[in-house]
Amino acid sequence: MILTSCPARLKGHRFPRSVIGYAVWLYHRFALSLRDIEDLLAERGITVSHETIRVWCRRFGPQIAAAIRRNRPNPADKWHMDEMLITLGGRKHWLWRAVDARGDTLDILVQSRRNARAARRFLKKLMTRRGLPRVFVTDKLRSYDVAVRQLCPAVDHRRHKGLNNRCEASHRHTRRREKVMGRFKSAGQAQIFLSVHDQTAALFRPKRHRISKISYHHARADAFSLWRHMTDELVG
């Protein structure tokens, strides 16, 4: 189990690391509100407010997401990129997302524009973290073509809406969480939350339909073990 009896505490926090890690896991693994998690913890005898849980998720979630990225294997050499519309404070923003051929999210970036400059900024951020792929697959938005020509002209760029279903399908989890949260409040909040949410999904959703039951059980046990290890390494 992720929630263990480990007594180790973070400086300035009255709850042990295991409780903090468990709350962060619940929030990013399931479509639960902060108040739902408050009730789940209360059932286990842990009295903590939803505001405290929010602070935990915002402060320690990015640390765990960074650790997941470090421990993940190298991505496949075919990357899919797409953008989706989100509304923040009544204004349109765009969530840019890249996934590999296995469907694992490589990176995301929330921006207020959907043009060549925004595509170039996202592509530069992506390549800084992940290097270069063999193939980019995008829809027919011309901004991608401009960005790829300027930053990595040697990469095979395939523009076809039907080929990019893998990335478009990854937006469904975001829409589900957006509904539970009553929309994202700001670009910063959306960026922090989705960065952790997507990495958690990559760890705990190992494409069950593609692997055997035994392999899935092993992958889930490894994910639990890795999460406990990352929780033990949290820095206050």
Image: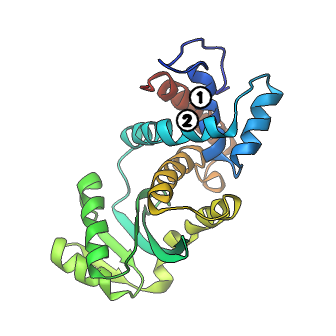
Residue 171 located left or right of residue 26: left
The residue type indicated by label 2 comes to Trp
Q: Quadrant of residue 4?
A: top right
- Quadrant for the N terminus, please: top right
Instruction: Looking at the picture, tell me which residue is in the foreground, 16 or 174.
Output: 16
Say above or below: 201 vs 140.
above
Residue 165 position within the rendered picture, expressed as x and y whole percent measured from the top left? 53, 76
Disc number placed over residue 20 in the picture, else none: 1
Residue sitting at 31 percent across and 71 percent down? 135
Q: Relative to 4, is 223 above or below? A: below
Q: Quadrant of residue 70?
A: top left
Mark 1 residue element: helix
**Image quadrant occupied by the C terminus:** top left
Between 190 and 146, the one lying in front of the other is 190
Image location of residue 123, percent across then percent down: 28, 67
Determine the residue positioned at 37% across, 78% down: 113
Q: Secondary structure at mark 2?
A: helix
- Report whether residue 153 is seen: no
Image position, residue 49 (x, y; %): 70, 34
Front one among 41 and 29 = 41
Task: Decide: is 223 above or below 104.
Answer: above
Please give the label number shown on residue 56.
2
